[in-house]
Image (cartoon, grey):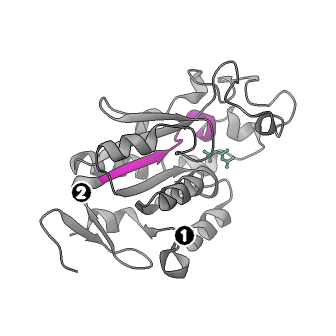
Amino acid sequence: MPTSPTTLAADAQPAPFVFDARHTALIVIDMQRDFIEPGGFGSSLGNDVTLLSGIVPTVAALLRHARASDWFVVHTRESHAADLSDCPPAKRLRGAPGLRIGDPGPMGRILIRGEPGNAIVDAVAPMPGELVIDKPGKGAFYDTSLDRALRERDIRYLVFAGVTTEVCVQTSMREANDRGYDALLVEDATASYFPEFRDATLAMIRSQGGIVGWTAPLAALMAAA
Ligand code: TIU
């Protein structure tokens, strides 16, 4: 693979992921207490949240790599305004009464911006200078300033991590693909309440010659040369 001093190739599927560190961003999706700790939105939907916490050390290692490589770093949080003006009734009413978005829970109002449950878990918390995007949808681009922020910085390559693989991560990656970014999902830095959905999503992304993008383990990304 021909490379310039800033062009790297990572061993990925379905083919090497060729990217330029100067034009790369890491997008960490929704590593918030709402999904990862008991008492938040994830558990209100009936999920076993312990299935997600296992990736926290890998996401932390990925963040260290991105920061050391001078990538632009973005964190997202799925969240709604306190008055729920950005939460379509169709989304809110999908939940069980008493456990809906905006209802009081053990970590504050469920999925509401600024509540304790909406905070990103400490081990992967944003650092000064990193962009935090509050998103009302599953996708990181829907009704947010993310695309503009990336284009202003001439970002063309996106590395994705976070939760959950088949919901917010996959939606965001598909949105990125349609917007013309080359996107890679880090296989061991994403998790689902349904491990079989995680595996199926990884297979879907890289099928048909990379119809949505690329996947690779963190070790392959860190070994890119
Ligand atoms: N329920 C589920 O799997 N995920 C979400 O509701 N949001 C995200 O994926 N962040």
Are dots 1 and 2 in contact, CB under 8 Å? no
Q: Which residue is mark 1?
A: 205
Q: Which residues are the magenta region?
A: 24-36
Chain-order first, disc 1 or disc 2: 2
Q: Secondary structure at mark 1?
A: helix
Label 1 Cα crowd, 10 Å radius (few <14 / some 14-19 / many 20+): many
The residue at 44%/32% (across/down) is 122
- The span from disc 1 to disc 2 (Cα, nearest Å) is 22 Å
Is 25 on the left or on the right of 197, as rendered? left
Residue 19 lies, in percent from the top left, at 28, 65
Location of residue 116 in the rendering, given as x and y in whole percent from the top left corner: 58, 22
Quadrant including the C terminus: bottom left
Residue identified by numbered label 2: 21
Instruction: Say which quadrant the N terminus sits in.
Output: bottom left
Identify the residue at the far right of this view: 97
| Residue for point 54% across, 69% down | 205
Q: Amino acid at mark 2?
A: Ala
Front residue of this view, candidates 190 and 150: 150
In the displayed structure image, the side of residue 99 where residue 189 appears, left or right: left
In the image, taking residue 25 as reference, residue 68 lies left or right, namely left
Q: Nearer the viewer, residue 215 or 145?
A: 145
Q: Quadrant of residue 153?
A: top left
